[in-house]
Image (cartoon, coloured by chain):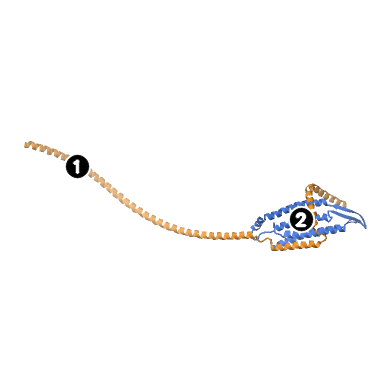
């Protein structure tokens, strides 16, 4: 039983030795440096004065208590609280501005709607007037067209009359020429007779 | 975490450190002091025992007190970084005090009935050296943390309090 225990300890010792041998060249220089400063520092630690260490420990614990009660670390630092205050002010102002903008937009929308309605009403009135005018113009144009047609007919008739009259005038001219010739002949006959 | 939470956390860690740096080593050395194997008493000399117990108690007290300060401080605070560094340095001194007090070369006297028939000496200096090397790396790490907390204090605080009002410190 004891031998088994010794073997087990031997295995552990071998493993530890292997680890030590592997890390030895890397860690030993660090260890030497540590030892050098610690040996120096330990000179200042008094021996066989346990009350001093107890006093130091009590002071550290009390200090820790006081510090953690005074500054538990859950209060925001000054610069962050100022930032927050500024943020809150900005948010408030932004909200106020948003409200103002909303109110003004509402007012403007209402005004725009009113104006739109007024303009619509005016447009409708103008459209009505325009339609009435168009109707009147159409009626007048129709009347004028009728009159034009009548006048055209009349002009056609007049033209025909003129043509007839011209023909008649031509005939009369021919007749007057003939009559003038007859008169000339008669005058010549008269002259001859007088002679 | 508020005041009570911080202090409670500090007390818990202080108790753990009292246990690991004072009570357990004290009991171990007291047990080893009067070790008897197969009727052969292996006795730790009185002077060595007293020396070891003194340094264990002295540094154990300091380490436990700094552990209280360290673990009760808000996360990533400068005071936490400071006391974490101090705690590591004290830990180094605590470990080294074993050698200073003779614990790296523990001498057991073998007493059979009344006669002193020799002694066993365990040299754990290399082990302590290895520990010191590891602690050196830990000191570098804690030193880096400390400078990080100091230099990036504003950023850390902004980050701590950006989650919600009241902050969060663990």
Image coordinates of residue B75 in percent, x first then y, are: 70, 57
Judge whether residue A1 can be spotted in this image: no
Tag 2 residue: B89
- SS at mark 1 in the image: helix
Q: In whole angstroms, how far apart are the C-alphas of marks 2 and 1? A: 150 Å
Chain whose colour in the figure is orange: A
Pointer 2 local density, CA inside 10 Å: few below 14, some 14–19, many at least 20: many
**Colour in which chain B is drawn:** blue
Instruction: State the residue in front, A172 or A68.
Output: A68
Residue matched to label 1:
A169
- Specify the quadrant of the image occupied by residue B28: bottom right
Residue at 71% x, 58% y: name it: B80
Horizontal and vertical percent position of residue B100 = 82, 55
Report helix, strand or loop for mark 2: helix
Q: Quadrant of residue A42?
A: bottom right
Mark 1 surroundings: few (<14), some (14-19) or many (≥20) residues within 10 A: some
């Amino acid at each position: 039983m004891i031998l088994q225990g010794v073997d087990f300890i031997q295995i552990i010792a071998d493993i530890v030795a292997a680890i030590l041998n592997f890390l030895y060249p890397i860690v030993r220089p660090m260890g030497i440096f540590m030892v050098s400063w610690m040996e120096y520092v330990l000179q200042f630690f008094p021996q066989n004065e346990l009350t001093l260490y107890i006093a130091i420990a009590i002071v550290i614990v009390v200090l820790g208590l006081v510090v953690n009660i005074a500054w538990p670390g859950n209060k925001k630092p000054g610069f962050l609280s100022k930032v927050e205050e500024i943020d809150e002010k900005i948010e408030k102002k932004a909200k106020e501005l948003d409200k103002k903008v909303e109110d003004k937009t509402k007012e403007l929308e209402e005004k725009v709607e009113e104006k739109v309605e007024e303009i619509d009403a005016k447009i409708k009135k103008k459209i009505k007037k325009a339609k009435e005018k168009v109707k009147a113009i159409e009626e007048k144009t129709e009347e004028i067209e009728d009159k034009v047609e009548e006048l055209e007919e009349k002009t056609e008739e007049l033209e025909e009359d003129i043509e007839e009259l011209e023909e008649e005038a031509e005939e009369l001219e021919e007749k007057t020429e003939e009559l003038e010739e007859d008169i000339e002949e008669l005058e010549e006959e008269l002259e001859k007779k007088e002679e | 975490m508020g005041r009570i939470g911080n202090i409670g956390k500090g007390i818990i860690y202080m108790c753990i450190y009292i246990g690991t740096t004072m009570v357990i080593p004290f009991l171990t050395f007291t047990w080893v002091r009067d070790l008897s194997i197969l009727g052969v008493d292996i006795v730790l000399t009185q002077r060595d025992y007293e020396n070891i117990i003194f340094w264990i108690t002295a540094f154990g007290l300091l380490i436990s007190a700094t552990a209280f300060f360290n673990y009760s401080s808000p996360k990533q605070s400068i005071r936490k970084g400071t006391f974490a560094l101090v705690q590591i340095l004290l830990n180094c001194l605590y470990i080294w005090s074993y050698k200073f007090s003779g614990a790296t070369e523990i001498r057991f006297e073998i007493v059979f009935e009344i006669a002193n028939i020799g002694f066993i000496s365990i040299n754990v200096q290399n082990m302590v050296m290895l520990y010191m090397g590891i602690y050196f790396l830990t000191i570098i790490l804690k030193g880096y943390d400390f400078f990080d907390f100091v230099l990036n204090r504003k950023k850390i605080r902004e980050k701590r309090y950006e989650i919600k009002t009241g902050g969060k410190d663990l």
